[in-house]
Amino acid sequence: GAVVSQHPSWVICKSGTSVKIECRSLDFQATTMFWYRQFPKQSLMLMATSNEGSKATYEQGVEKDKFLINHASLTLSTLTVTSAHPEDSSFYICSARPHGYYGYTFGSGTRLTVV
Amino acid sequence: GQQLNQSPQSMFIQEGEDVSMNCTSSSIFNTWLWYKQEPGEGPVLLIALYKAGELTSNGRLTAQFGITRKDSFLNISASIPSDVGIYFCAGLAGAQKLVFGQGTRLTINP
């Protein structure tokens, strides 16, 4: 149990286009999901906290207009990278915490390459 | 903000050797988590620690929650090739947001 599914696993897009990444909790409901960004050989950096039915909370320095988050249901959160540029290329990972479970479960990540 | 200092940053060991890594913080945490990440994948939870002084094992892995609540260590005994990866500690201080260490990259020579 406690599986978080993330799609796509990888995506290549042209500079200036937008890309949507989905994060689903498969066997539990998640009122809160988290979005991280990870550069090569670095740790995970929290970008934003996604809240079902309300606005996301962004970490300092993260552009909310560039990284749009939608948490429309208890099992789905999406991250849209708008007007992507090469510097947005990174590994994006989502996570959620099942109720009654102390560990955070992570998705398998999405490798975004902007060319 | 809260930070976790994880060491060592990398380890190169022989198969069969034991491994030890730790995390320290200037802040108190209520929960310590240890994750393993393999290339191109998300982190996978190895061990969760909820109480100061707690010592928990998961197979060849053992982790402890420091008495001061500001540190934790992870030991891997008798390493095998599939232990290769990056190990992260993460702390939770009451809010929902995890704070991650910088990671320990483990390389094993067969």
Image (spheres, coloured by chain):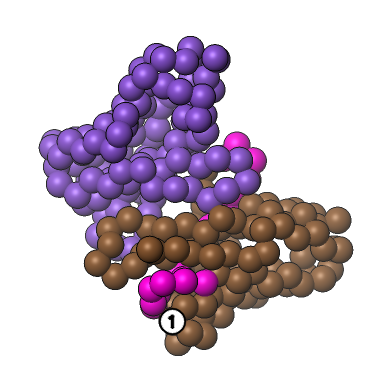
Which x, y percent locates residue A106? 47, 57
- Graded by Cα atoms within 10 Å as few (under 14), some (14 to 19) or many (20 or more), the crowding at tag 1 reads some
- A61 relative to A85 in the view: left or right: left
Residue position marked by numbered label 1 in the rendering: A74
Indicate left or right for A29 with A50 as reference. Answer: left
Residue A82 in view in this figure: yes
Query: Which quarter of the rendered picture does the C terminus of chain B lie within?
Result: top right
- Judged left or right of residue A47, residue B16 is left
Magenta-colored stretch includes residue A48: no
Mark 1 chain: A
Instruction: Provide the letter of the chain coloured purple.
Output: B
Looking at the rendered structure, the number of numbered marks drawn on it comes to: 1
Tell me what residue is drawn at x 40 percent, y 32 percent: B6
Give percent across and percent down for residue B32.
28, 46
**Residue at point 64% right, 41% down?**
A40
Amino acid type indicated by mark 1: Leu
Looking at the picture, does residue B4 appear above or below residue A98? above
Q: Secondary structure at mark 1?
A: loop
Q: Is residue B56 above or below residue B13?
A: below
Q: Nearer the viewer, residue B22 or A48?
A: B22
Q: Chain A appears in which tint?
A: brown
Residue A32, image x and y in percent? 40, 73
**Do we see residue B72 in this rendering?**
no
Q: Nearer the viewer, residue A32 or A59?
A: A32
Residue range of the region highlighted in magenta in the rendering = A24-42
Residue at (27% x, 58% y) in the render: A102
- The x and y percentages for residue B33 are 32, 46
Image point 19% across, 49% down: which residue? B50
- In the rendered image, the vertical position of residue B39 relative to residue A59, given as above or below: above
